[in-house]
Image (cartoon, helix red, strand yellow):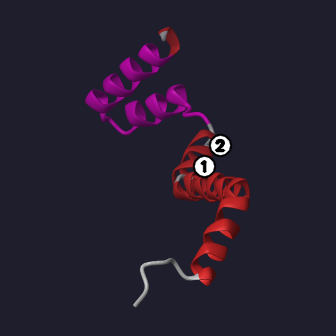
Amino acid sequence: MSTEASPYLGGVVRAVWRSRWNVARLSVAVLVLWVLAVDTGGRLARRQLASLPGFDYVAEVRFLRAAGRYGEAMSIADAGIAVGAG
């Protein structure tokens, strides 16, 4: 065996070195795609949560008071006041 590198290996190294910026761009694109794909479920869940309608505290308190569930009505009313103040 000779100690010289084969001409084929030298050609591969030169080809990779010439296309280093293409490989770098491809690597960055794959990284960005992976980051976006990983968070897709979380983003969808946050959008669905944000699109839910607001809670009608007054109607809920009225319903609970009519049903005689005064403790629950008080806690819902306190939560509504806290949300309105915040």
Q: Secondary structure at mark 2?
A: loop
In the picture provided, is 66 more to the left or to the right than 54?
A: left
Identify the residue at horizontal 53%, vertical 52% (top origin): 39
In the picture provided, is 55 more to the left or to the right than 26?
A: left
What crowding class fits label 1: few (fewer than 14 Cα within 10 Å), some (14-19), or many (20 or more)?
few
Q: Position of residue 38 (x, y in %)?
A: 52, 57
Q: Amino acid at mark 1?
A: Gln
Check the image and report above or below for 27 versus 76.
below
Q: Amino acid at mark 2?
A: Ser
Residue at the extreme top: 85
Q: Position of residue 32 (x, y in %)?
A: 62, 51
Residue range in magenta is: 54-83
Q: Is residue 71 magenta?
A: yes
The residue indicated by pointer 1 is 48
Residue at the extreme front: 2
Q: Position of residue 66 (x, y in %)?
A: 42, 34
Identify the residue at horizontal 61%, vertical 73% (top origin): 10
Q: Is residue 63 magenta?
A: yes
Check the image and report above or below for 27 versus 48.
below
Contact flag, marks 1 and 2 (Cβ < 8 Å): yes
Q: Which mark is residue 51?
A: 2
Q: Is residue 19 visible?
A: no
**Is residue 24 or residue 5 the one in the foreground?**
5
- Image quadrant for the N terminus? bottom left
